[in-house]
């Protein structure tokens, strides 16, 4: 059996390159997103939660709630009012409310 002695080198450069590539991928894709992205996701999540609770109220009671406080008291909706302002505008009891979420920062 023939063994090529030139190929029996230490794989240091290849391992270093693979390690560098792994670190770069982790830095780009695995580490948490920046604060602006997290804030945007929080705004979307709060808006979706308010809309979901309002729809649940409509299904159970036959009408959309007249205020955001009703959802907080009766449907367990929780909003961090120190960080976000939620605008809940209802036109009629059979029309979905217009929900806007704004960061207070």
Image (tube, rainbow, N blue to C red):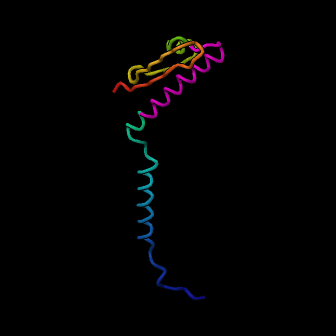
> Does 89 sit above or below residue 105?
above
Give the percent coordinates (x, y) of residue 83: 38, 24
**Which quadrant is the C terminus positioned in?**
top left
**Which quadrant is the N terminus positioned in?**
bottom right
Q: Residue at x 41, y 70 (%)?
A: 13
Left or right for 96, reference 23: right
Q: Residue at x 57, y 88 (%)?
A: 2
Instruction: Report the number of discs.
Output: 0
Give the percent coordinates (x, y) of residue 78: 50, 20
Q: Residue at x 51, y 15 (%)?
A: 90
Where on the picture, by quarter, is residue 61? top right
> Does 81 sit above or below residue 45?
above
* Front one among 59 and 76: 59
Residue 19 lies within the magenta run: no
Give the percent coordinates (x, y) of residue 22: 45, 58
Q: Main secondary structure of the magenta part?
A: helix
- Which residue is situated farthest in the bottom direction here? 2
Q: Which residues are magenta?
A: 40-64
Where on the picture, by quarter, is residue 23? bottom left
Where on the picture, by quarter, is residue 94? top right
Q: Residue at x 66, y 15 (%)?
A: 60
């Amino acid at each position: 059996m023939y063994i090529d002695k030139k190929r029996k080198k230490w794989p240091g450069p290849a391992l270093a390159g693979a390690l560098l590539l792994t670190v770069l991928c982790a830095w780009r894709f695995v580490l948490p997103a920046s604060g602006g992205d997290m804030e945007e996701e929080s705004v979307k999540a709060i808006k979706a939660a308010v809309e979901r609770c309002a729809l649940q109220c409509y299904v159970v009671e036959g009408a959309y709630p007249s205020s955001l406080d009703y959802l907080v008291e009766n449907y367990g909706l929780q909003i961090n009012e120190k960080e976000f302002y939620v605008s809940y505008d209802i036109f009629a009891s059979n029309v979905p409310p217009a929900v806007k979420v704004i960061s207070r920062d």
